[in-house]
Amino acid sequence: MANVFCVRRSDPEELKISIPDRGTDVLISVLALACAALAETESQKRMAVWLAEHDRRLGTGFIGFAIAEMPWEACSFAEDRGFLVRAVDAASMQTGWDKLSYLPNEPQLRPILGWFHKQLLRLKITDIDPYALNDWLDDMEPDDPVQTGFPKCDRHGIYKTFLGCQICNCQGV
């Protein structure tokens, strides 16, 4: 199965990318590592958690997402988009990869990260879903990591999600 990623769901097929399930796990893992290394603000930490929640553990195949539907805030859009661009670049430079129990296939991963970099730059404030952040927060339980100070995994150093550590879960730890 494959997961489809895009800026907007209405994008034509040629602007979307399809990534196999295992590739999605790897992508989300390297982005989670980079985001955890770079996040400073609450909105950046929320982005890191949201990304880590969107691997294939929510199901297999057709799990991808539209970047415009991430939990953006208009007031911090430029800073948060810049943060995600830097995180993609850091993932491309193998930031945190030493915490993985495997070495990602760089020749396969590099074009995917390049696609995300390009699409983040293409994203405009007018593209974002103004309700996505509140909808996501409203669905959380009081003990959700986003509600309890953004705890990190002791082993991998990434922000935990309501499912725990994305990397531990993917590695069966």
Image: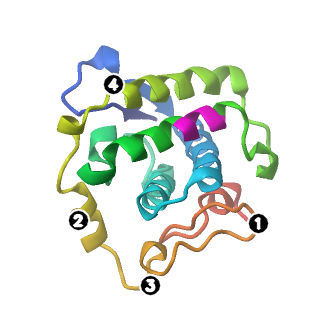
Other-residue count near label 1 (Cα within 10 Å), few / some / many at <14 / 14–19 / ≥20: few
Residue placed at 59% from the left, 74% from the top? Answer: 151
The quarter of the image holding the C terminus is bottom right
Q: Position of residue 56 (x, y in %)?
A: 49, 49
What amino acid is at disc 1?
Arg
Q: How many angstroms separate mark 3 from mark 2 (CA)?
A: 17 Å
Q: Which mark is residue 122?
A: 4
Other-residue count near label 2 (Cα within 10 Å), few / some / many at <14 / 14–19 / ≥20: few
Q: Main secondary structure of the magenta part?
A: helix
Q: Quadrant of residue 95?
A: top right
Q: Secondary structure at mark 4?
A: helix
Please state the extent of the stretch shown in magenta in the rendering. 86-91
Q: Quadrant of residue 123?
A: top left
Drawn side of residue 101 relative to residue 58, left or right:
right
Q: Which residue is mark 2?
A: 134
Residue placed at 48% from the left, 41% from the top? Answer: 84
Residue placed at 47% from the left, 23% from the top? Answer: 115
Q: Which residue is mark 3?
A: 143
Q: Nearer the viewer, residue 107 or 85?
A: 85
Other-residue count near label 3 (Cα within 10 Å), few / some / many at <14 / 14–19 / ≥20: few
Residue found at the far bottom of this picture: 142
Q: Which mark is residue 155?
A: 1
